[in-house]
Amino acid sequence: MKRKILAYNFEFSETLNRLRNTYDVEIFEGINPKTDPTFLQALSKAAGIVGLALPVDKELLDRAPKLKIVSNNSTGFNNLSLEEMTKRGVMGTNTPGVLEDTTADAIFGILLASARRIPELDQFVKTGNWKQHLTRKEYAIDVHHKTLGIIGMGKIGSLIAKRGHFGFDMDILYHNRTRNLQVEEKYNAVYCSLDSLLMESDFVCLMTPLTPETENIMGEREFKLMKKSAIFVNGSRGKTVDEKALIEAIRDKEIYGAALDVFQNEPVTADHPLLQFSNVVTTPHIGSSTHETELKMAKLAVENLEAGLSGKRPKNLINPEVLNKFNKGV
Ligand code: DGY
């Protein structure tokens, strides 16, 4: 009998076609993985799962006794309970190395859109309000030659620094768990404490992964430290921000505006208070979402899945301890 693979919210599912000779591939889109009976039934037989943002927790793992690998179709893997997976000998993989420039473009894009009020002024034109020359009511703020503070200087953070430094003559400040000497050398980035970064930056760009240390890293105190003229940009994960504190900071004009690609709960609902402000630019977690990059990610996710299922070490294994623990020899 063929071993089962589940694809969950996996847009380029055709990349799985060549595995169909060997595996029984079942595709799931837009279902609730906690309650969908067909999914739960398939899960009990699944050897591999590939897809985006499936919450792989103890409860799911308890229902998946045959599971060997979860191949995440993203770089972020905060949806995986790695400790539980490792305990049970389940490999986890992600898709780094193919989406960093694309994500940096998107996050720099929303920074620009927010500073220059592009979505708001697009609506101004389309709703017939452009009837005379612009007045200061429509003016925006400059990006070039300002100070860009980046919290989380990994690969994507570095590429945002590159864009700011070379493209916009910006001064770069950064805060990270460890110093990143490359960005200091290449983009004149200056390492500083979180508080100094918040106090001195004109744009505060949050790019950390979501971990217990970074959950709600931006709260009331942090927004109060920011300049009133500064814009907050979130390209990390929604749970890194206390959204209530952000709503208050915007409402009380503690900061100039925000650009958000991620939310505590996604998809965000239209009645969310953050969506009611004209100075909050929002996008639906578009970081890596271009045709070219999503296809590359899907191919990499399938390669990782196939390697794990055929007893080889997947290229992007994120819990290598799993190999020692069970001496799987991959
Ligand atoms: C990633 O790869 O982590 C992006 O945020 C898409 O989820």
Image (tube, helix red, strand yellow):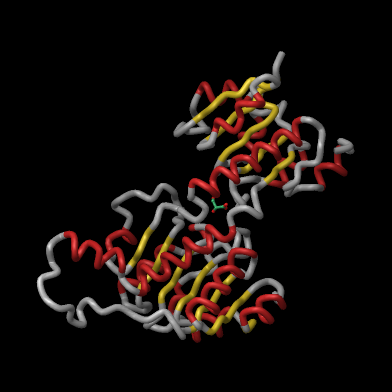
Q: Residue at x 40, y 66 (%)?
A: 259
Q: Position of residue 321 (x, y in %)?
A: 82, 47
Vertical placement of residue 88 versus 267, above or below: above
Q: Is residue 327 left or right of residue 206?
A: right
At a point 60% along the width and 60% down the height, the residue shown is 209
Figure check: 258 above or below 287 = below
Q: Quadrant of residue 250?
A: bottom left
Give the quadrant of residue 185. bottom right
Q: Quadrant of the C terminus?
A: top right
Where in the figure is residue 33, as x and y percent of width and height?
52, 33
Q: Nearer the viewer, residue 177 or 125?
A: 125
On screen, residue 59 versus residue 102, left or right, reads: right
Tell whether 329 sits left or right of 183: right
- In this view, which residue lies farthest toward the left? 131
Q: Residue at x 47, y 32 (%)?
A: 29
Q: Quadrant of residue 256?
A: bottom left
Is 54 in front, or is 312? 312
Q: Position of residue 7 (x, y in %)?
A: 57, 31
Q: Position of residue 129 (x, y in %)?
A: 13, 67
Residue at the limit of the structure toward the top, as seen here: 1
Vertical relation: 90 (above or below) 4 = below
